[in-house]
């Protein structure tokens, strides 16, 4: 996203900014598949002890934080895309 923002300052690179935004979205969509798989694996593990429960909860929270960060990058790419379209 920072690369796309930097390209906004150079009119000749607006096309490249759009390509970067598409790449961010592709990676974000790919991360959804990985996240679903990771959650499926996490919740298919046997939970035997209270420590297992805590570990599962903590790991899910980490996954959730990563997903929020990825979603924020996709939102920023949408803003950059809007700026490029508006100034094209």
Image (spheres, rainbow, N blue to C red):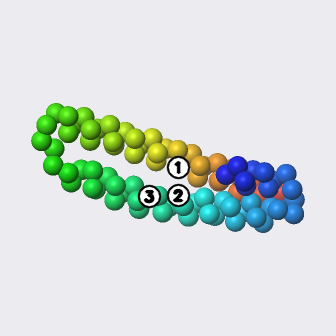
Q: Out of 16 and 47, give the one closest to the viewer.
A: 47
Q: From where the camera sits, is residue 30 visible?
A: yes
User: Label for residue 28?
Assistant: 2
Q: Which badge, 1 or 2, comes first in the chain's sequence? A: 2
Dividing the picture into quadrants, the one containing residue 4 is bottom right
* Quadrant, the C terminus: bottom right
Dividing the picture into quadrants, the one containing residue 15 is bottom right
Residue at image coords 58%, 52%: 74
Q: Residues within 10 Å of mark 1 (few under 14, many from 20)?
A: some
Give percent across and percent down for residue 32.
Answer: 44, 58
Residue at image coords 15%, 49%: 46
* Circles 1, 2 touching at the beta carbon (< 8 Å): yes
Give percent across and percent down for residue 27.
Answer: 54, 61
Q: Judging from the image, what secondary structure is the residue with disc 2 in?
A: helix
| C-alpha distance separating marks 1 and 2 | 6 Å
Q: Judging from the image, what secondary structure is the residue with disc 3 in?
A: helix
Q: Most extreme residue toward the left, as rendered?
A: 48
User: Label for residue 48?
Assistant: none
Residue at image coords 70%, 65%: 19
Give percent across and percent down for residue 24.
Answer: 60, 58
Q: Is residue 54 left or right of residue 14?
A: left
Give percent across and percent down for residue 39.
Answer: 32, 52
| C-alpha distance separating marks 1 and 3 | 9 Å
Q: Residues within 10 Å of mark 3 (few under 14, many from 20)?
A: some
User: Label for residue 32?
Assistant: 3
User: Label for residue 70?
Assistant: 1
| C-alpha distance separating marks 3 and 2 | 6 Å
Q: Which badge, 1 or 3, comes first in the chain's sequence? A: 3
* Circles 3, 2 touching at the beta carbon (< 8 Å): yes
């Amino acid at each position: 996203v920072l690369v796309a923002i930097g390209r906004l300052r150079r009119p000749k690179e607006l096309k490249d900014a759009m390509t970067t935004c598409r790449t961010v979205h592709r990676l974000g969509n790919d991360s959804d598949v990985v996240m679903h798989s990771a959650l499926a694996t996490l919740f298919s593990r046997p939970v035997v002890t209270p420590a297992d429960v805590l570990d599962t909860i903590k790991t899910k929270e980490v996954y959730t934080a990563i997903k929020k960060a990825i979603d924020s990058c996709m939102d920023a790419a949408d803003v950059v895309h809007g700026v490029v379209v508006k100034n094209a």
